[in-house]
Image (cartoon, rainbow, N blue to C red):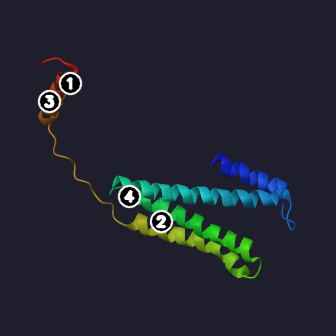
């Protein structure tokens, strides 16, 4: 993240656009950089969720998904303006607003969904004690002491 922020700051300082000053270029570049960071963190989160097989935390995932949508669609608006100039001006102006609306819809849908309840495990103190005793016996066996 530090490298991305440093690059955005350097780019705004070294190569400011002709239409705006360095401060405006810095603000726009930092916004794009933060959107990239948020999108990458969202992708990383969902990749780790998929790899680890976690099936809980649906609300948290929905909130992160909303932030990811917001960042990705807002970046598309920035890139549309950067690549095509003012040819698709209305698209590049409306995409950041659309990004926020999509994120809000995602958050509302996720927060209105009823929470899933996870059943508490049926574990007694006696079962825990027996399991710990068997683990200690196994540990003593490996370090060379008899139980």
Residue count near mark 1 (Cα–Cα under 10 Å), binned few <14, some 14–19, many ≥20: few
Residue count near mark 4 (Cα–Cα under 10 Å), binned few <14, some 14–19, many ≥20: few
**Residue at label 4?**
50
Earlier in the chain: of badge 3 and badge 4, it is 4
**Mark whose residue sits in front, 2 or 3:** 3
**Residue at label 1?**
142
Earlier in the chain: of badge 3 and badge 1, it is 3
Q: Is residue 105 left or right of residue 26?
A: left
Kindly identify the residue that appears in the image at 15 percent across and 33 percent down: 131
Separation of disc 3 and disc 1 at Cα?
13 Å
Q: Is residue 135 left or right of residue 76?
A: left
Separation of disc 3 and disc 4 at Cα?
33 Å
**Mark whose residue sits in front, 2 or 1:** 1
Earlier in the chain: of badge 1 and badge 4, it is 4
Which label is found at residue 134?
Answer: 3
Separation of disc 2 and disc 1 at Cα?
51 Å
**Residue at label 2?**
107
The spot of residue 124 in percent (x, y) is 14, 38
The spot of residue 20 in percent (x, y) is 85, 64
Kindly identify the residue that appears in the image at 66 percent across and 57 percent down: 33
SS at badge 1: helix
The spot of residue 44 in percent (x, y) is 49, 55
Q: Residue furthest top?
A: 145
């Amino acid at each position: 993240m530090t490298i991305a922020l440093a690059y955005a700051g350097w780019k705004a300082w070294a190569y400011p656009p002709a239409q705006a000053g360095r401060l405006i270029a810095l603000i726009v570049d930092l916004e794009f950089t933060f959107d990239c960071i948020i999108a990458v963190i969202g992708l990383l989160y969902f990749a780790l969720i998929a790899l680890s097989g976690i099936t809980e935390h649906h609300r948290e995932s929905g909130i992160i998904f909303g932030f990811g949508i917001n960042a990705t669609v807002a970046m598309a608006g920035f890139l549309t303006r950067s690549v095509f100039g003012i040819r698709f001006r209305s698209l590049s102006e409306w995409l950041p607003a659309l990004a926020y609306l999509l994120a809000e819809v995602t958050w509302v849908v996720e927060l209105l969904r009823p929470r899933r309840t996870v059943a508490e495990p049926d574990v007694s103190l006696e079962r825990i004690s027996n399991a710990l005793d068997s683990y200690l016996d196994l540990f003593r066996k490996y370090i060379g002491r008899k139980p």
